[in-house]
Amino acid sequence: MTKELEIEFKNMLTREEYKRLLTHFHLAADDVKTQENYYFDTADFKLKEAKSALRIRKKLESFECTLKIPAPEGNFEITDPLNALQAEAIISGQSFEAAEVYAALQKLQVEPSQLIMIGKLMTHRIELGYKDGLLVLDHSEYQNTADYEVEFEVQDAKLGQQQFLEFLQLQKIPVRPADKKIARFMKAAKSGI
């Protein structure tokens, strides 16, 4: 189990801006890592109300269960590694073998038996070091749609925000606020895209 503070800045990109950044950083198809993200909430959206999000992520052949909860700056991420059988049991609603995430859900008054999978999102991700943080280029596919975003993960919120805004300005990318992926997924699901 890990619990870490996540401070990140996000901006939506057009497809053309995304491709331009790939060219700018000399990135190729080999640099892309595909992730499958399965999102969960209760039928009455208790996690959403608590400004929290629960997902299982599959990267290559590894799995992890992550609960994001609000922190004074950014989010806390509570993560348990899973094997394939444990991940499938959670996805299918049979059992919940992610002990630290389970304990954090209890504090939010959410029982794993209340959880339902609300959807799946595929992310094609490229990560690279930039200034004092990690620059992430994401191409996500969900609900018959695709979007593109850039994220900048940092340790220092003030410095990170300054560096991110400078990056956008340098790349001639307008500031476009980006909701969390789960929020974009839910908006697409509600609109029936």
Image (spheres, rainbow, N blue to C red):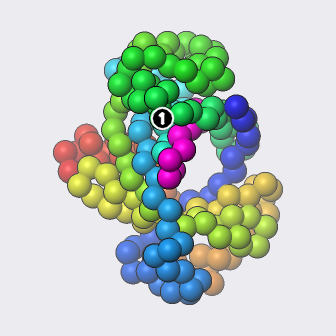
Left or right of 156, for residue 165: left
Q: Amino acid at mark 1?
A: Ala
Q: Residue at x 44, y 80 (%)?
A: 19
Asked if residue 120 is positioned above or below residue 84 in the image, the reply reads: below
Q: Does residue 45 appear in the picture of this structure?
A: no
Question: Percent from the top left, x then y, of residue 4?
Answer: 73, 40
Q: Does residue 134 appear in the picture of this structure?
A: yes
Q: Residue at x 49, y 68 (%)?
A: 32
- Neighbour tally class for label 1: few under 14, some 14-19, many 20 plus, Cα within 10 Å: few
Helix, strand or loop at mark 1: helix
Tell which residue pokes out farthest to the left in this image: 192
> Viewer-proximal residue, 149 or 115?
115
Asked if residue 150 is positioned above or below residue 157 in the image, the reply reads: below
Left or right of 166, for residue 113: left
> Viewer-proximal residue, 34 or 78?
34
Q: Residue at x 62, y 58 (%)?
A: 9
Q: How many marks?
A: 1
Segment tinted magenta in the rendering? 59-68
Q: Main secondary structure of the magenta part?
A: strand
Q: Residue at x 79, y 67 (%)?
A: 132
